[in-house]
Image (spheres, grey):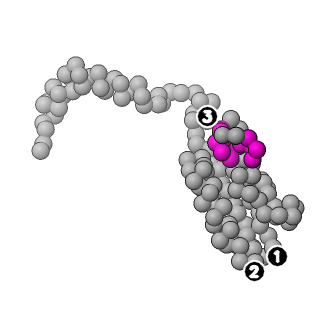
Amino acid sequence: MLIQFSALVEILNRPILQSITVRMNILREPDSESNNSEMSNKPKINNVEITYCTQCLWLLRAAWLAQELLTTFDLDLTSVALKPGTGGVFQVTLNTVLLFSRKDAGRFPEAKEIKQLIRDHIDPERDLGHSDRAKNESV
């Protein structure tokens, strides 16, 4: 269906459509904002990388941890990458900052522990629910 330009102008001049248009413009971010507010509105890039040992067959463990992180931080993480390695490596980094190393800790990380470390970097005020509670703390 084609609407002629004059008919479209007439429709847009109706009070209810003007109100809708004004509301839409208010909701839209103004173009004349300062650079500081534009910078604060930009989404932050958070890349997690899980390096796992292929010789030790730790892919499943790394994939499980990646799934846990993507479930918890679904809108906050830009990517979760699995990076094959050798020599017993199991490391978790966030934006190239080492958060956990199996060799340094002498053990594998708990999912709760990695979630807390990532949260502390990207959104310290965020509540992780049961992942923040101590084992002896009642619900």
Please identify the quadrant where the C terminus is shown: top right
Q: Is residue 122 visible?
A: no
Q: Amino acid at mark 2?
A: Gln
Q: Check disc 3 and report its element: helix, strand or loop.
A: helix
Q: Amino acid at mark 1?
A: Gly
| Residue 87: mark in rendering | 1
Q: CA distance from mark 3 to mark 1?
A: 41 Å
Which of the 4 image quadrants contains residue 92?
A: bottom right
- At horizontal 47% and vertical 31% (from top left) the residue drawn is 29
On screen, residue 15 above or below 46: above
Front-most of residues 139 and 125: 139
Q: Earlier in the sequence, mark 2 or mark 3?
A: 3
Front-most of residues 94 and 67: 67
Residue 93, position in %: x, y?
Answer: 74, 57
Q: Check disc 2 and report its element: helix, strand or loop.
A: loop
| Residue 40: mark in rendering | 3
Magenta span includes 92: no
Q: Which portion, as a residue range, is magenta? A: 126-137
Q: Is residue 106 visible?
A: yes
